[in-house]
Structures are given as structure tokens and as C-alpha cells.
Amino acid sequence: MRTNIAALDEAIRTMLASGQNICQVHRFAADDPGHIRRLSRWADLPRNASVVDMGSGTGEVARLWHLCRPDLAFNLVNISQFQLDCLPGWGAKQHCCDMTDVPEPDNRFDAAICCFAIGHVDKPGDAFKEMSRLVKPGGIVFVYDMIRLRGDNRAMAELGYTVGPRGTLDDASRANGLDLDIYMEPIPVPGFGESVLGADYGKYFAGVVPAIWRFVVR
């Protein structure tokens, strides 16, 4: 599945116009800073870590994460220059590239985060392989995404996204040098997705639930 960058950028424009700066349909707090603080606690990244944000969107996740953890240095990776240009000036290094081919050396980072992005990759293993390459042995890879409990991806394919059962990501991560440390399926704030997407929420996201993985690089 090739990412339709123009369609993705248009979706981001619509999201920004509606006041939503984070492209994640499930939230774990009443506001964006609280949501990111919750993700940060679950990720538990090392002090003073250099972090690569794979599929960073506009960079708002990393910006808010940096506000609650100013010791962290973020590097943004996104295939869309438009999205990277949405939040200029706060100091994060940027790479406009595919998240499976990042122009950084092996073992460059202490941690990687990947939030609502891995489903844009044709083969999740390719993304895990790149994160395993970029992050030092013993470093952390934190993934916030979804798992599919029922249904299929026909509607979600319109968004250029695929969500599979838990085992799809578990197998891909294990095969690419990542050992599972924590897995959870946290309960999101009720009604958030419906309030943003209306009837389209059920169309696209029926049958999936949010999921959190924290891995340690071998």
C-alpha cells in the first residue's frame, strides 16, 4: 500500500482547521497535554535520551512530550514536508523521508516512538527493523497504535492505513530484534473519536481498540 501523501496532507489540513493538532483517534486524557503525559509515563524513556519520532505527524506529539520531559531531544521523521512545516521553530531536528529508510547511522538514538504511524508501512517488520537499527542495544521502542479484534481494513484503506491483530506486530517486532517489555490495551476517553469524526468514526474504526507496546532492543 503506497501512502497517498496528498490525501494524507489534506486530512491533516482538515484536522488542523477543526482545532485538532494530534492525529490520533483514541485519547487517554481530557486534553492533549494530559494525553501526552500519559503516553510519556507508559513509555518511561531514559533520562536525557535522544529520541527518534517515527511518523511524527506535525510534530505536536514530540513538542508536548518535550514540554513534560525537557531532558529529551527529539528528531522527527515524516514522509510529508507539509506536516513537518506545521510546527516550525521549536528546535527538533527533522528528516523528510520514509520511516523505513532514515538517513541516520546505526545505534544513533536511545529510544524511538511510533504513534499512530506504523499502519502506513506495507510491512510492519520493515519499520521495526529500522527502529532496531537506529536505537542502541538496551534502548526503548515505544509504539502506540491499534489492534484489530474483528472486521477488515477495506474502509481504513481509504486513509492509507492497515490495522491487524496483535500477533502481526508481536511477530514482526520479535523477528527484528525487539523484546517485549510491556503490552496493554488502555481504555480511551469515551466519545472522543466520535466527537471528531462523527459517523465516520464507526466506518473507519469499528472493530479496533488502542494498544501500547514497549520494547527493549536486543
Image: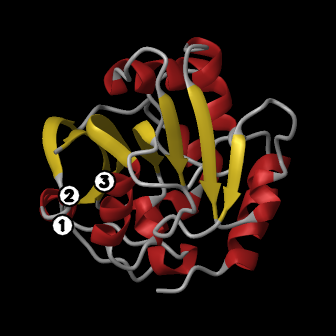
Mark 2 residue element: helix
Mark 2, Cα crowd under 10 Å, few <14 / some 14-19 / many 20+, is many
The residue that disc 3 covers is 132
The amino acid pointed to by label 2 is Ser
* Image position of 181 (left or right of 49): left
The residue that disc 2 covers is 173
Q: Are marks 1 and 2 in contact (CB under 8 Å)?
A: no
Q: Give the Cα distance between marks 2 and 3.
A: 9 Å
Q: Residue at x 26, y 73 (%)?
A: 151
| Label 1 vs 3, first from the N-terminus | 3
Residue 31, visible in the rendered structure: no
The residue that disc 1 covers is 168
Asked whether 96 or 195 is in front, the reply is: 96
Asked whether 210 or 144 is in front, the reply is: 144
Query: Across the whole image, how many numbered discs are drawn on residues?
Result: 3
- Give the foreground label among 1 and 2: 2
Residue 16, visible in the rendered structure: yes
The amino acid pointed to by label 3 is Ser
Q: Is residue 180 above or below residue 110?
A: below
Q: Position of residue 38 (x, y in %)?
A: 43, 20
